[in-house]
Image: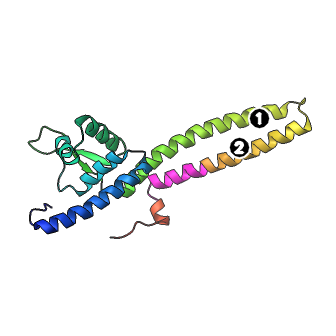
Amino acid sequence: MSLDHLDEKQQESLQKIRKRVIEAIGKNMDLYGVTLSTGHLYGLLFFADKPMTLDDMGREMEMSKTSMSTSMRTLLDLKMVNKVWTKGSRKDLYEVEFDWHQTFTDYFAIKWRKAVETNLQVLRKAISEVDKLLMDEVASEAVTEVLQRDRDKMKQAVSYYKWLDRLIDAMEDEKIYELVPKEEE
């Protein structure tokens, strides 16, 4: 909705409120690994009445087109904004993804799944190597004890990553919302 129907004082008050929210969003976007200016850009789109072009955003943000393009690519990769089509427009238009639950799930599922896969692979290989060393009849009792302790620690880590993998599954298939329901507006 346009602010044109508000008087100057109302517009100033609302812009001040929006600026405070945009600043908070920008500061908290480091959770997603993005810069403050990219967070501010997301905040601008959050309050936009309609999809915006890079030129529109550049005028509002006073950012270079290169910075705008980089920020938008980041937000698109994070699935925090969507490219939209509007009849008669040749320029790309962008709007925010308002389903923050989905944004959170998409981002963390991708990041966590990568960590799970990488760490499980490393841990399983290390456990296999420790098992081979444990089968060595030459190993002293002290060495065997250390190897078994290390193996137990790595097995605990494997259990954690299996749990994390199930948590990611629960996020992706939305079963997480059975345990922690979304807030009603």
Looking at the image, residue 80 sits to the left or right of residue 107; the answer is: left
Asked whether 32 or 110 is in front, the reply is 32
Looking at the image, residue 164 sits to the left or right of residue 6; the answer is: right
| Residue 67 image position (x, y, % from top left) | 28, 37
**Residue at 47% across, 54% down:** 171
169 in the magenta segment: yes
Amino acid type, mark 2: Met
Q: Which residues are magenta?
A: 162-175
- Residue 157 disc label: none
Q: Quadrant of residue 11?
A: bottom left
Q: Quadrant of the C terminus?
A: bottom left
| Residue 131 image position (x, y, % from top left) | 78, 35
Amino acid type, mark 1: Val
Q: Quadrant of the N terminus?
A: bottom left
- Residue 130 disc label: 1
| Residue 146 image position (x, y, % from top left) | 82, 40
